[in-house]
Image: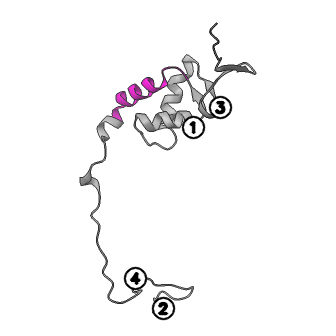
């Protein structure tokens, strides 16, 4: 006899999937998926995150559907702004400027109210 463990629960008319660590994630219906992908990818933060970060944001929000990994990666590939930006590379980084101290604790300075001069 084969016993299947049911990972889905119906709570107040919403279908939930029991994920790892017994976290309930809401099953997202077909017509809601595009809105959720758009919000996770380019929502209020305007981040245009890649596929993995978009997937993480959807999971953190407590949502799930069977093909959301594939859908999120495809959505990110079709985003025009994300494709134009591309990945950050080493040329975009600022060079580090080493600071040489002439004496001990010379880099530390404290400014108190009323004066703009260092106290050393």
Q: Which residue is mark 2?
A: 119
Sequence order check, earlier mark of 3 and 4: 3
Sequence order check, earlier mark of 3 and 1: 3
**Badge 3, how many Cα within 10 Å: few under 14, some, many 20+?**
few
Secondary structure mostly seen in magenta is helix
- Colouring of the image: one colour
3 or 1: mark nearer the eye: 3
Q: Determine the secondary structure under disc 3.
A: helix
- The answer for how far apart the CA atoms under marks 3 and 4 are is 50 Å
Residue 89 point in image, percent of width and height: 27, 49
Q: Which residue is mark 3?
A: 22
Q: Are marks 1 and 2 in contact (CB under 8 Å)?
A: no
2 or 4: mark nearer the eye: 4
Q: Which quadrant holds the N terminus?
A: top right
Sequence order check, earlier mark of 1 and 2: 1
Magenta-drawn segment:
65-81
Residue drawn at (65%, 12%), measured in percent from left and top? 3
Near-viewer residue (108 or 39): 108
Q: Determine the secondary structure under disc 4.
A: loop
Q: Which quadrant holds the C terminus?
A: bottom left
- Position of residue 31 relative to residue 45, above or below, is above
In this rendering, would 93 be left or right of 46?
left
Q: Which residue is mark 4?
A: 107
């Amino acid at each position: 006899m084969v016993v299947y463990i049911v990972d889905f629960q119906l709570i107040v008319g919403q279908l939930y999937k029991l994920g790892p660590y017994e976290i309930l994630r809401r099953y997202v219906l077909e017509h809601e998926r595009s809105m959720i992908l758009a919000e996770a990818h380019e929502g209020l933060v305007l981040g245009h995150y890649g596929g993995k970060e978009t997937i993480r944001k959807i999971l953190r929000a407590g949502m799930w559907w069977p093909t959301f990994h594939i859908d999120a990666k495809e959505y990110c590939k079709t985003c025009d702004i994300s494709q134009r930006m591309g990945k950050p590379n080493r040329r975009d980084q600022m060079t580090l400027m080493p600071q040489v101290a002439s004496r001990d604790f010379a880099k530390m300075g404290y400014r108190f109210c009323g004066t703009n001069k260092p106290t050393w």
